[in-house]
Image (cartoon, helix red, strand yellow):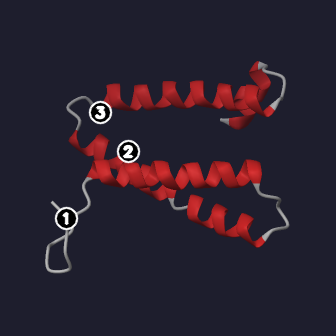
Amino acid sequence: MIATLKDNIQLTNSSLKYFGCLFMLIDHTTMILVPQTSTFYYIGRGIGSLAAPIFFWAISEGGFYTKHVGRYLRNLIISGIIFQAVFILVEGNSFTLNTVFFWL
C-alpha cells in the first residue's frame, strides 16, 4: 500500500534498522571513496553518524523485550569482541591481546 499524506506513517523497529543500515552504508562508502577535504565527506559522515543512535535504540529495545537479559548481554559482549577483532585486523594493526584490550 502506498502511503499518502493522510495516512499515519509508522516506523517499525525493522524499518529503523533498514534506515540504520543505509546510513551506515553511506558512512562507510564516504569514508572509503570521498577525499577528506571534500564537503561531501562531511555530509556523508554526518548522515552516517545517525546510524549509531538507531542501533543503540534497537539494542535497548531488544534488551527490554528479551526473556533472558544475561544471555542477551553475553551475546552482545561476545559479538562486540569478535567485531572489534575483525576491525583491528582490517585496520592493519597487529592482532595481539594488548590491542584487543586497548580497544575495549
Number of marks: 3
Identity of the residue drawn at 75% across and 51% down: 33
In the rendered structure, are the residues bearing label 3 and label 1 in contact, judged by CB atoms less than 8 Å apart? no
**Residue 101, horizontal then vertical, whole percent:** 71, 29
Mark 1 element type: loop
From the viewer's side, name the closer residue of 104 and 29: 29
From the viewer's side, name the closer residue of 50 and 97: 50
Tell me the amino acid under the disc marked 3. Answer: Val
Q: Quadrant of residue 35?
A: bottom right
Tell me the CA gap for discs 2 and 3.
12 Å
Q: Quadrant of the C terminus?
A: top right
Tag on residue 23?
A: none
Specify whether 85 is left or right of 95.
left
Identity of the residue drawn at 59% across and 54% down: 26
Label 2 vs 3, first from the N-terminus: 2
Tag on residue 69?
A: 3
Tell me the CA gap for discs 1 and 2.
29 Å
Tell me the amino acid under the disc marked 2. Answer: Ile
Tell me the CA gap for discs 3 and 1.
38 Å
Q: Which residue is mark 1?
A: 2
Q: Which residue is mark 2?
A: 59
Identity of the residue drawn at 41% across and 26% down: 75
Tell me the amino acid under the disc marked 1. Answer: Ile
Specify whether 3 is left or right of 32.
left
Which label sits in the foreground, 1 or 2?
Answer: 1
Identity of the residue drawn at 19% across and 75% down: 4
